[in-house]
Amino acid sequence: MSAVAVRSDLLKIAKKFGDPNTIVSDALRRYTIERCVERIELARAKIRAYEKKYRVAYPVFARQVKTDSQFLRRAEAKNPAWEADAMEWQYRLAEVEEWTAILDRILAE
């Protein structure tokens, strides 16, 4: 168990509701859940923006730029920074997976 500094006036009030360790632990759990959900939502919003911009999901996009020269030429013509977009798009997909896994672990406890 780790020690956390808590204002004494808040600790005094928290004691009226039960065991301060339980209260702080529950509050920290809720906080981490909220932050995980925020990260997931932000990453998904960015993913949706790329899907709208390129009109396909990332797996299709990644395959098409490798196998369809016409698709690649259109992507390059409309979006010269398509490679940077692809890197961030892939990063955001991994970010959703990572934060979802963390959230699942928190919720399973």
Image (cartoon, rainbow, N blue to C red):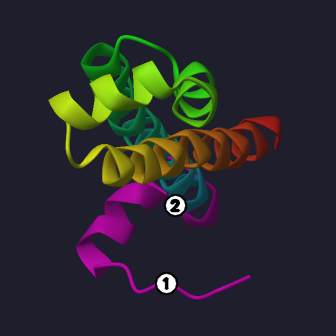
Point out residue 75 in the picture as x, y percentages from the top left corner. 31, 29
- Quadrant containing the N terminus is bottom right
Magenta highlight range: 1-22
Mark 1 element type: loop
- For image coordinates 27% across by 37% down, the residue present is 76
Q: Is residue 23 above or below residue 96?
A: below
Mark 2 element type: helix
Apparent side of residue 33 relative to residue 19 in the rendered image (left or right): left
Q: Is residue 77 above or below residue 91?
A: above
Q: Earlier in the sequence, mark 1 or mark 2?
A: 1
| The stretch drawn in magenta includes residue 72 | no
Q: Is residue 15 above or below residue 70?
A: below
Q: Nearer the viewer, residue 5 or 66?
A: 66
- For image coordinates 20% across by 45% down, the residue present is 80
| Category of crowding for the residue at label 2, using alpha-carbon neighbours closer than 10 angstroms: few (below 14), some (14–19), many (at least 20) | some
Residue 30 visible in rendering? no
- Image disc number at residue 40: none
Q: Nearer the viewer, residue 41 or 46?
A: 46
What is the CA distance from the residue labelled 1 to the residue labelled 2? Answer: 9 Å
At label 2, the amino acid type is Val
| The stretch drawn in magenta includes residue 19 | yes
For label 2, the residue is: 24
- For image coordinates 23% across by 49% down, the residue present is 81
| Category of crowding for the residue at label 1, using alpha-carbon neighbours closer than 10 angstroms: few (below 14), some (14–19), many (at least 20) | few
Cβ–Cβ below 8 Å for labels 1 and 2? yes
Point out residue 109 in the picture as x, y percentages from the top left corner. 82, 44
For label 1, the residue is: 4
Apparent side of residue 30 relative to residue 78 in the rendered image (left or right): right
Residue 57 visible in rendering? yes
State the count of labels.
2
